[in-house]
Amino acid sequence: MDNTSVTSTTSVTGTSGAAAGEGLLAGKVAFVSGAGRGIGAAAARLFAQEGARVLLAARTEAQLAAVTEEVGAAGGTAEYVVCDLADSASVRAAVDRAVDVFGRLDVAFNNGATIQRPGPMDRMEEADFDQIYDVNLKGVWLAMVAEISAIRATAGTGAVVNNSSVGSLMGNPELPAYGAMKRAVNSLTESAAVTYGPEGIRVNAIAPGNTPTDMISAWEQDSPGLRERLTAHTPLRRAADPREIAQAAAWLLSDRASYVTGTVLRVDGGARA
Ligand SMILES: NC(=O)c1ccc[n+]([C@@H]2O[C@H](COP(=O)([O-])OP(=O)(O)OC[C@H]3O[C@@H](n4cnc5c(N)ncnc54)[C@H](OP(=O)(O)O)[C@@H]3O)[C@@H](O)[C@H]2O)c1
């Protein structure tokens, strides 16, 4: 695949009440990375339902097209762009696409990430470590820089939420590089909050716990019984629905969270309490 190529469909526009002016994110333009499936797809659906016009980004075009179509069918407004977070030109072009299509950028959910092959750090290939760094940390930095620039040039003020992980808050014997990049995302989040707060751009992170998606399935393949172990360590004794994670991101991106910046909000069923 040409990582720098950017593809989009015509936008799917609906006429729901939310799009017309009601809803938590009414009137806002939102960029969502990793929006083809899992938590990002749930976020794209929810943000649109809450009145945002949404640009979905990820690498797999068929998944993006399906979620975009779904949003339109439900009365929301969405478009997608193919984007590889490991490619700087691709990330910049994807964020710029939000401004090209919708005329502005107000909020962004940097959700896209990949999981490492589970195992102790001494068995990890250097190339795998580099890949996790490229996508899960550098990709978030590249996206934030492009988003801050686009928000500043259009909406003027806005908000960014980075998707970290409850794994950023502890040792990760099975996912050491993943945990390290997520902890670094928390640091970038706090630094960005302090840097851009004076101009009215809020930056927060969420730290989800166990949410059954392809990412958890991939981890479980190498770690049988994972889901049961995670549930046993979660006081609410169940996994999250991806929409429950998206709800926290939506609130942090909304004006209801107008005095919240620089925080890493656990959305983990109490797993780290
Ligand atoms: N599921 C959990 O229990 C859990 C817990 C804590 C934190 N999280 C975090 O939640 C976020 C979403 O994860 P998920 O569970 O929804 O996983 P998922 O279902 O595997 O979705 C990951 C999304 O990220 C995209 N992505 C991966 N690599 C990419 C790249 N190089 N460039 C652009 N997009 C890329 C994927 O699309 P393509 O492959 O098509 O690019 C996909 O849309 C991640 O940041 C993850 O670390 C998840």
Image: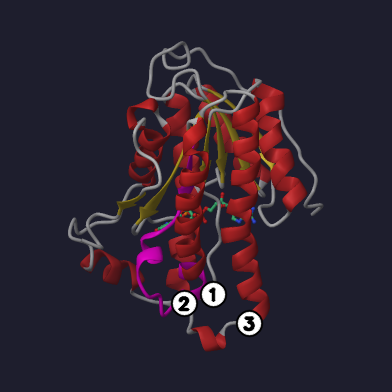
Per the rendered image, the range of residues in magenta is 159-179
Task: Please tell me whether residue 112 is drawn above or below residue 25 in the rendered image.
Answer: below
Would residue 2 appear left or right of 268 to someone viewing this image? right
Amino acid type at image mark 3: Glu
Q: Please give left or right for residue 262 compared with residue 122 in the image.
A: left
In the rendered image, residue 163, in percent from the top left (x then y), is placed at 46, 51
Q: Is 225 covered by the magenta stretch?
A: no
In the rendered image, is residue 10 in sight?
no
Assess disc 2: are there few (<14), some (14-19) or many (≥20) residues with their C-alpha within 10 Å of its C-alpha. few
**Residue beneath disc 3:** 125
- Percent x, y for residue 248? 35, 41
Looking at the picture, how far across and down is residue 135, in whole percent?
62, 59
Q: Which residue is mark 2?
A: 222
- Residue 101 in the image: above or below residue 134: above
Considering the numbered disc 1 on the image, is that residue within a helix, a strand or a loop? loop
Residue positioned 52% across, 39% down in the render = 196
Observer-nearest of 95 and 201: 201
For disc 1, the marked residue is 117
Residue drawn at the location 48% of the way across and 69% of the way down: 180
Is the C-beta separation of discs 2 and 1 under 8 Å? yes
Q: For the point 39% across and 41% down, which residue is it?
A: 261
Asked whether mark 1 lies closer than 8 Å to ligand 1, one says no
Q: CA distance from mark 2 to mark 1?
A: 8 Å
Q: Looking at the picture, tell me which residue is in the foreground, 57 or 135.
A: 135
